[in-house]
Amino acid sequence: MFKFENLKNEQKIEFMSHVRDEYKKIISNKDSVVSLEQYKAMRMNSYEDKVLEPFLSDEAFVYKMEICIKNAQDLPTYKLARHYDEYLSTDGVRELMKRFKKVKNIVDDVEILVFPPMGD
C-alpha cells in the first residue's frame, strides 16, 4: 500500500511537485475537511487525489469509493476470488461500503435523536 510517509525525502519532493498550491494549502491544515460539494467541484490529478484522501468528509469518501467501484473491473458472477487482493478489490470493498453506509446512517439518525436540530 502506498504511504506518503514511507517515501524518501527526494521522492516526497518529486511526488509533491505534481500537487498544485491550492491542494497543498488544504493539506497544510491538519483540521481541513473537504466536503462532498467541494470534492465534486475539484479537478485533481492522481497525486492530488491521493494527498487529499485523509481530508475527505465521510460523504466525499463514499462518493469517491462508489466511483472507483463502478469503474473497477468486476469478477464474472460465476467466479470466486482466487486470493485476498482479488477479494478486497471486488466483493470485499463492495460489502464494506454497503456496511459503512448503513452504520453511517445509523450514527446520523442517533445524532439527530440525541442532538435535535435547533429551531431558528
Image (cartoon, rainbow, N blue to C red):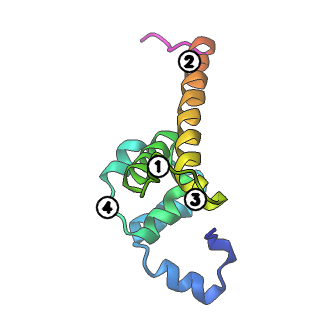
| Residue in the picture at 61% in, 59% down | 82
Along the horizontal axis of the image, is 55 left or right of 49?
right
- Residue numbers of the magenta segment: 115-120
How far apart, in angstroms, are the residues tagged by discs 4 and 1?
Answer: 16 Å
Badge 4 or badge 1: first in the primary sequence = 4
The secondary structure type at the circle numbered 3 is: helix
> Comparing marks 2 and 1, which lies closer to the viewer?
1
The secondary structure type at the circle numbered 2 is: helix
Residue flagged by tag 2: what amino acid is it? Asp
Q: Is residue 1 above or below residue 29?
A: below
Q: Which residue is mark 3?
A: 86
Label 4 close to label 1 by CB (< 8 Å):
no
Q: Which residue is mark 2?
A: 109
Badge 2 or badge 1: first in the primary sequence = 1
Badge 3 or badge 2: first in the primary sequence = 3
**Picture quadrant where residue 1 is located:** bottom right
| Residue that protrudes farthest toward the front in the picture | 78
| Residue in the picture at 59% in, 22% down | 106
